[in-house]
Image (cartoon, coloured by chain):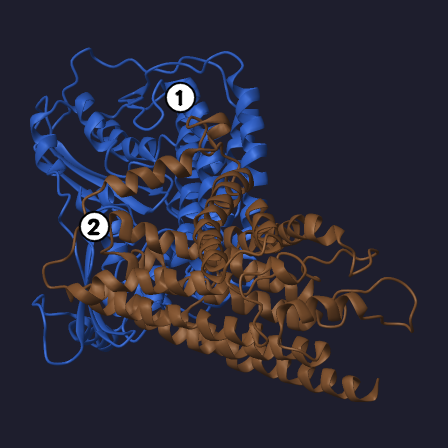
Amino acid sequence: MGNVDLTEIPESQKLAYIAQQAADGRVNLEFETDEGMTLNIGPQHPATHGTLRIVAKLDGEQVISCEPAPGYMHRGYEKLTEVRTYPQVTTLINRIDWLGSFANEVPFILAAEQLMGIEAPPRAQYIRTILFELSRIANISLFLGDLGIQLGGITVGFYAFRDREFVLNQIEAVTGGRFHPNFDRIGGLKDDLPKGWIAETKKAMEKMRAFCDEVEDLLIGNEIFQARTRGIGVIPPEIGLAYGLTGANIRGSGVDWDLRRDRCPAGLVYDKVDWKVWTHPDGDCFARSWVRLQEVREATKIVDQLLDSIPSGPVMAKVPRIIKVPEGEAYVATENPLGEMGYYIVSQGDLVPFRVKIRSASFSNVSIVPWVCRGVYVPDVISILASLYFILGDIDR
Amino acid sequence: MSAQLAVLAALDWDLPYWAVTLIKVLVAALLVPTTALILGIVFLFKIMSWMQSRLGPQEAGPKGLLQLLADGVKFLQKEDVIPERADRFAFKVAPMIVLVSTFLLYVIIPAGPDPAVIADLPTGIFFALAVSSLSVIGVLMAGWASANKYALMGGIRAAGQLIAYELPMVLAVVGVIIQAGTLNMNGIVVAQANFKLFGDVGPGIPFIITQLPMFLIFLAAMQAELTQPPFDMPVAESELVSGYQVEYTGFRFLFFFLAEFATAFAFGAIASVLFLGGWYLPGLDVNSEWFWLIGPAVLFAKIMLVSFLIFWFRFTYPRLREDQLQRLAWKWLIPISLVWLAVTAVFKVVM
């Protein structure tokens, strides 16, 4: 985990225990067996947000073991980046986590900037951070809606889709794209902010805060919701760390860890704003959902503060017209809406990267499903999956 | 409801028995799809979109009111797919059984004084409770016959849930029966018209005043019987992908849809009769002939009120888990209804 001081490093015995647990949770991906019924959840199932396949072995309604089988939407992005120039890569990686797409571009661009030794001008850094947080709000507000849909309260889903538009409109006003902005450039941004955008964004942040209150009233505070999520899918902090959970999933387990604060990469200005990293000690589905709700609220605060203090100046540094990244390796990770997202770039001084390894949060986040889903009921599998919050593009890349 | 008035006219003309029966059957056959359409359009389309701050259907007909008709026609056009390994006979019969249980419920609903009811059974409410359980068989058959694991789980969940919630529903009804002293649906309405809380002053008051806990329990049990959120585990979309309905297409699915909404209407009618005074309007003389005219309208208004409550819960709450549902029934609803039953019985004897 780099230079971050996390909680205590698990001892080897603990690791062996966890490995054993994971082995127990593993399902032989065959069909019927003598013990229990094999239920094939997905690849086409409403709870899998796309094409994740989960093979569950059931005893009645109880899950004996279950195993996610990802890969149905693999698009080979890591390989495809090797035949694209650096500026072209952002078009691809926008599609990894498609709900918070601007946030995907940033770590790649930052890694490339680090290799080239370029730093974006301050105004570009501010706008970059603002857009990063806007995509976080757009992403997580949809998570809150989806949580409602998965647990049967579909009204929240419609509210989320309605209110997310306020944020998407702001992103569109700057970048021209609602979902896939493709706006970040090595050395800055494509364009400056349009006129009047700051005031409108502040209004949108007000609306998102109202949306958070609404969700808290309608869903998070609801007794049935709490009965469905409290004490379900408990992930202890050391297990979560061992499986590589990041983002709100590990903060929901009580680990105070946020890359924005702990390891803010050069090029983002989180150190200039005042905000709080929320954690929850319980580690259950409710804790994860609650932490995400607070994350949206904090994000609106970050955006407000940045809008107030945004400096003037250019949005693009001096970069060569043809971008050749010097030989070297760099890994930059940021705290994306889903968790830690990092790009490990190996360059050989070419127009194109030699090799790119994408560390996406959801792939690690769903890897804990076999561990956490043993012994729960089928409806709990759905609430656990919903609260772990994965996006298929982020798993399969 | 004007069809009910036609029945009145028919009775006055002293038609032969077969003609009266035919008219009654036709009325029931018309009422079931009509009421399902009304509830579907008003609540599923209009109120739901209003609550969820979206537009809802706009294009088909004036203000999109014909959307459900268009959907119905669409269902009729669809291919009738039966899974290869399905139990074909049970698969085909299941939706009809569910629909028949709905038809039978309509038989005993009084839309006005005596002749305005299809069959004025002496044990009307008992009959209603009995036939409403028939739908469980259809649901279980659908779940089993589909040869689908999701459908099977949905069917078994439905069976467990419907049986568990029969009991609080029956107990809630028994409270009213004790207070009214009759099982006849019209008798219960008349009992509410004559029921005075403080001496002999004022108009007759509906039983909801004295049976409020029973009314709430009846609403909860009704919600579970209709498999609507927060008790929609048998058809849970995000878990079981519509449960026992998952393999049904075309008009067979339409049967389930019709049965769901028509049953919601019928249960709304039963709740209105038991707790809200049915076709009776406080302040009027119960023997007034006006009730033949305004009775159906009054009942309809009350049904819409109860249905609004049902659908309001449906659009607001998340879904419970199966074990939590059973716990709610056995640990809360049944004990509370038993206590209130005892209280009712004591007051009945004392007063």
Q: Is residue B23 visible?
A: yes
Q: Quadrant of the C terminus of chain A?
A: top left
Q: Residue at x 23, y 67 (%)?
A: A370
Q: Residue at x 20, y 48 (%)?
A: A51
Amino acid on which the number 2 mark rests in the picture: Gln
- The x and y percentages for residue B335 are 60, 83
SS assignment at label 1: helix
SS assignment at label 2: loop
Q: Which residue is mark 1?
A: A172
Chain B is which colour?
Answer: brown
Chain A is which colour?
Answer: blue
- The x and y percentages for residue A220 are 52, 55
B299 to A157, vertically: above or below: below
Please identify the quarter of the rendering in which residue A114 is found: top left
Cα distance between the residues tagged 2 and 1: 31 Å
- The x and y percentages for residue B138 are 32, 67
Label 1 chain ID:
A
Looking at the rendered structure, whether the residues under marks 2 and 1 are on a common chain is answered as: yes
A198 to A103, vertically: above or below: above
A237 to B350, vertically: above or below: above
Q: Which residue is mark 2?
A: A44
Amino acid on which the number 1 mark rests in the picture: Glu
